[in-house]
Amino acid sequence: MRSLDGHSPLSAFIYFMSVIGLCMFCRDLIISSISLLFSVLYYFVYGAGRGVGFHIFAAVFFALMVAINPFFYHGGSTVLFVLGDNPVTLEAVIYGVSASEMAVSVLYWFRAFTRIMTEDKLLSLAGRFSPKFSLMLSMVVRFVPLFARRSKKVNDAQRVLGAYKEDNVVDAVRCGARVFSGTAGWALENGITTADSMAARGYGTGRRTSFSLYRSRAHDFVLIALTLVLLAGAVVGAAAGEKFSFYPEIVVPGGAFAILLYTFYTALCATSTILEISERARWKYLKSKI
Amino acid sequence: MEILKVEDLSFSYAGAGSPSLDGVSFSARAGEIIAVCGASGSGKSTLLRMIKRELIPEGERSGDVFICGARQSDLTPRDAAADVGFVFQSPEMQIVCDKVWHELAFGLENLGTEQSVIRRRVAETASYFGIGGIFDKRTDELSGGQKQLVALASVCVMSPKIILLDEPTSRLDPIASLEFVSMLRRLSRELGMTVIIAEHTLGGIIDMCDRLIALDGGKIIADGSPRDSIKSLAKTPLIYTLPAPARVFISTHGEGECPLGVSEGRAYIENNFKNEIRSLPRSNKSGTGGAALEMKDVFFRYDRRGDDVLRGMSLRVSDGEIFSILGANGSGKSTALSVISGIRRAYSGRVRIFGKDISEYKNQTLYRGCLSMLPQDVQTVFLKNTVYEELCDVGGKDFELPFDISHLYKKHPYDLSGGEQQLAALAKVLLTKPRLLLLDEPTKGLDGATKRLLKTIISSLKDGGTTTVIVTHDTDFAADISDRCALVFSGEVICCDDVDKFFFESEFYTTETSRMTRGYYDGAVRVDDVLRLAEINGRRK
Amino acid sequence: MIAIKNEKARTFLRVALPFFVIPAVVVAGAVAFGGTRYVWVTLAVSILALLLFISGFEKKKTGSRRIVVTCVMAALAIVGRFIPLFKPIAALTAICGIYLGGEAGFLCGALSALVSNFYYGHGPWTPFQMLAWGLIGVFAGLLSRPLKNSRAALCVFGVVTGLFFSLVMDVWTVMWAGAFDFSQYLAAIKTAIPHTVMYVVSNVVYLLLLRRPIGEKLDRLKIKYGV
């Protein structure tokens, strides 16, 4: 099995959107817990980021949201304590936990999404839908580092020409605007060359196709099918079964449909981690054979 | 087979008084390499654009262009796009897409080609051009030479019959130019593509082209084999861009076949001139004044974990000198300039400007009446809407320039030709009244006339007491203008000498003239030296 | 995707869609889901709006110069974001709308939101941001004449769009955190006041600072190259 990275953009995109979409759609403590567990697990297994900054942010965010919710919702039957005139209820706290789990897990999923769905892959996806928009996206992606480098060059040139009068902040901002305007002038004027170069290579002669290096192979179809089956099962479970309810008191749904929802969603969330781990294991195995 | 035919083509731009092209006729066969040369403003770029239908500018035109026998205006949009390829001057901006493979596929995507066909053509082209290694790279990370090669490949992927190139090597360094030009040669010889290059410097391409068409004022003044055509260039500024052997031949009114290469030139001199007096009296040019610039054991790197770019560079430039720094790409010359100009700081070693340590120039005083630099890309200098505003920006309302560009004042900086931009930018730099002037590749992409003007400007600045440090690849220019030269390799100054001695003692890194006359004349490093020696010695009977 | 022959009807639809159809879908969705799935509905709707806009754009013929200039503006807006103290996306999107029309404005805003999130991280907010900035571009295009001629109008526009963007993103924050609740929304707005004020002020400042220099350049391109 290949990791998500090795799959085509379409299959990876469908996977992420299914996991995130379902989690956002179901307001359910168990779903959000499953999502949080696997999003964090996958984040680490995949190695979506280094450094602790993001985790600290996520933790603070989580704590704040859990803390804030009970002060706005006073529904629920189990009063924990009364603050001023407002009762703080267990149900509201649990609801807060569920909402923050959802929000934080989505953050984690999107971190991995940003790493896996590189510009390249997103471009190829966009190309399926709109070759023209995809082309524009490609151009912007190319221009950004180009212009950033250019503005450094303009800054250097202007500095030596004595554009900066003093070493202070006001002057720095004023010159920043000048440099930006100079970069913009260069970019716009020379953009005409880009446009001519497009026209010279037949842009606008007819319907465009969009070429992509990514090909959908058998394992992509397998992943898409798996994702859709798990998603469909979970949706059926969510739609037909009892709902998780927070107010007036917490009711955890039971029955076959609820079990269908939870097991299928767990399987869906776990897929990414399993794919990642199995690929590593296979590499280790292959290496040991050499 | 006749692939291109231009018939009595005339064109004037909308709103322009005089025509840019005036009754131009020529035709091209399959596989021919044609150089179209002329000074800037001679109409060569316009001619190229007239052949490419998508790029025909607004204006009034008469005459006709036929491509493979079909009238240009009758072509279908697909054929017009695919059959004629166009490569622009700027490697940076003619690339459209973010990845190399995507750029290669771009033209075929526009024609609505099927995925599998694109896949094959892109793969074939990448292999043929030897750019498989950078296939997955981002286009903005490539070097200038690689970018230009990708631009050429992305045109060739559409299998054009004619490729038009507008000064394709003017922004490249010599090695990259050589590689690019040899690729053009392969396209013509192996694939039978017709290649038409517009150039205003002839050195790099003349010995590979089959035909040379010279334009002047929109008219063809010569059309024939390069050796024949260049004889009629004697009176135009183009002569200064010819290879040294040809210049010697033309200036001495030689007879017969014009020499192009070093060995041919050598044979011409040996057969025609005596060498009883082998060298000219040499004047000692080395500066004796105080130091304008001193570098002592300077080390620099861009990144703490990166490699050193400058490894203990030491240099001394005397007050009032013109000093050239030569060296290959990546040897650290440009980095050295940025350290001297205070844009980057050395992590060890000392840089002194007029005897004062560079870090002691506080509050940007270094850039007021002391030091200034003309960057390699002069468009970074421009911020305003007219040249006049640009100059007022640094010089105040009434400024004085050592050269006259008042005819450009009302123009937008981006409407100027490359040479004019160079002059306008230099004017702006000079208005900061620098005592130490730094020039980064000032001759890159310049035509013969502007190059000569630049030489007179720099020598007149020297008379006014300005010290000039030039970083360049252009050995001819350095030999003409410098007092002393230094060779930089791998972040160090390898040798530093009086200009005549420097070029005479260098084996490879020297002027064509020096290589041509080595062992026959001593210390003749410039074409003018050879001409004088030849005159003194007289012709062989 | 949708082929409407009449140019006027198409323009009408393109404008009407984000302002009438989509809010209607939001309300309908909210009713259908009993007021608990705002995030989902709005997200779906904003993606739908973007897709509809893009598919309409795909059908049209757009000259290569116009495309490149729009992309350049979008890229400049993102590069501006890298400069410390400098957040000119909304201002540049507006300028693009004023000088090149609403469609270019929309594309500039949407593209810069999408691509800048390659650097700052994607999230469920990506389609939201794309739509919000895109709409600023559309508005600027519709109000092009007054905004070009009057500094006062430009200031008002800067304040309004700055507020609009902040409020929309606050709505989003609240909805994302749970079901939409007005008191919570007010609280979110209150805590975001310093940030909102900063954003509005900088938006106005950049509009005033950049409109002339960038506008002059765009006008020049229009005259010289017929963009």
Image: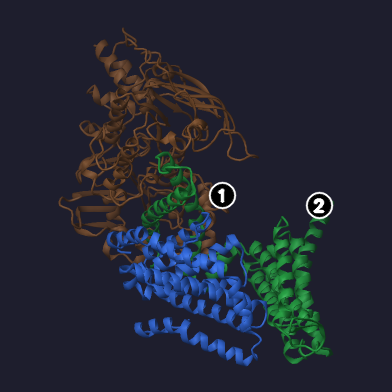
Chain colours: A green, B brown, C blue
Q: Mark 2 falls within which chain? A: A
Cα separation, mark 1 vs mark 2, equals 28 Å
Q: Is residue A62 left or right of residue B293?
A: right
Instruction: Report helix, strand or loop for mark 2.
Output: helix
The residue to which callout 1 is attached is B134
Q: Nearer the viewer, residue C215 or B451?
A: C215
Q: Is residue B454 left or right of residue B506?
A: left
Residue A245 percent coordinates (x, y): 77, 88
Specify few, some or many for label 2: CA neighbours under 10 Å numbering under 14, 14-19, or 20 or more: few
Image height of B359 relative to B415, above or below: above
Extreme residue toward the left, this view = B17
Image height of C9 relative to B282, above or below: below
Identified at 24% across, 45% down, the residue is B409
Image height of A228 relative to B64, above or below: below
Same-subunit check for callouts 1 and 2: no
Q: Does residue B384 show up? A: yes
The residue to which callout 2 is attached is A287
Q: Does residue A1 show up? A: no
Amino acid found under the numbered disc labelled 2: Lys
Amino acid found under the numbered disc labelled 1: Ile
Q: Mark 1 falls within which chain? A: B
Identified at 68% across, 64% down, the residue is A112
Q: Nearer the viewer, residue B28 or B404?
A: B404
